[in-house]
Image (cartoon, rainbow, N blue to C red):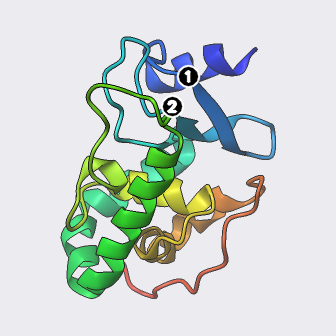
Amino acid sequence: MNDHSRVEQLIGRPPQSAFDVVVRDGSGDPVVLRNAPFLDDGTPMPTRYYLVGPDLVRAVSRIEAAGGVRSAEREINDTEITMTHRAYSAERDAAIPTNHVGPRPSGGVGGTRRGVKCLHAHVAHLLAGGNDPVGRWTLAHLGDDYDVLDGLIPPAPLVDLIDKETP
């Protein structure tokens, strides 16, 4: 099966923009996508990195459901989060042709400029090679789900697990 068809299965709809698979699992299945900065119809796409690996999506969803977004915002320095948003935005914007006229994507990770909006987007950014403290925080809170990172290509960064049940 080609990547486009597999991604359609994973997200439950046809992809709406060009993408590259930048992280795969050990079987070659897509885990993280790098999206083009615009959808096929020209609409700005703020989300550069998108987590699609189902096991990792479920594991991160459990952290979010337990209050992970608020916990991450409390525990991670605001300046570090802001710097992450700026770097993410700059990387996405560098993929836009210099002669582009019209609306442009805005915001940083998950399309926001401040704070934490989506742990999935931060994990995707980290796994794709970004320096993302929220992504690291999230991986550290995977607990019993940490094995979802086994076999990723490229490998997930090593983090120390937090020894507690909830974020």
Q: Which residue is mark 1?
A: 18
- Residue at 67% over, 36% down: 21
Q: Nearer the viewer, residue 88 or 6?
A: 88
Quadrant for the N terminus, please. top right
Is 98 rendered above or below residue 1? below
- Which kind of residue does numbered mark 2 sit on? Ala
- Residue at 61% over, 55% down: 128
Residue 122 visible somewhere in the drawing: yes
Q: Mark 1 or mark 2, which has the lower sequence index? A: 1
- Which kind of residue does numbered mark 1 sit on? Ala
Q: Which mark is residue 88?
A: none
Q: Is residue 146 left or right of residue 101?
A: right
- Residue at 28% over, 25% down: 102
- The local crowd at label 1, few if under 14, some if 14 to 19, many if 20 or more residues have their Cα within 10 Å, is some
Q: Position of residue 130 (x, y in %)?
A: 56, 64
Q: Which residue is mark 2?
A: 36
Q: Position of residue 146 (x, y in %)?
A: 59, 67
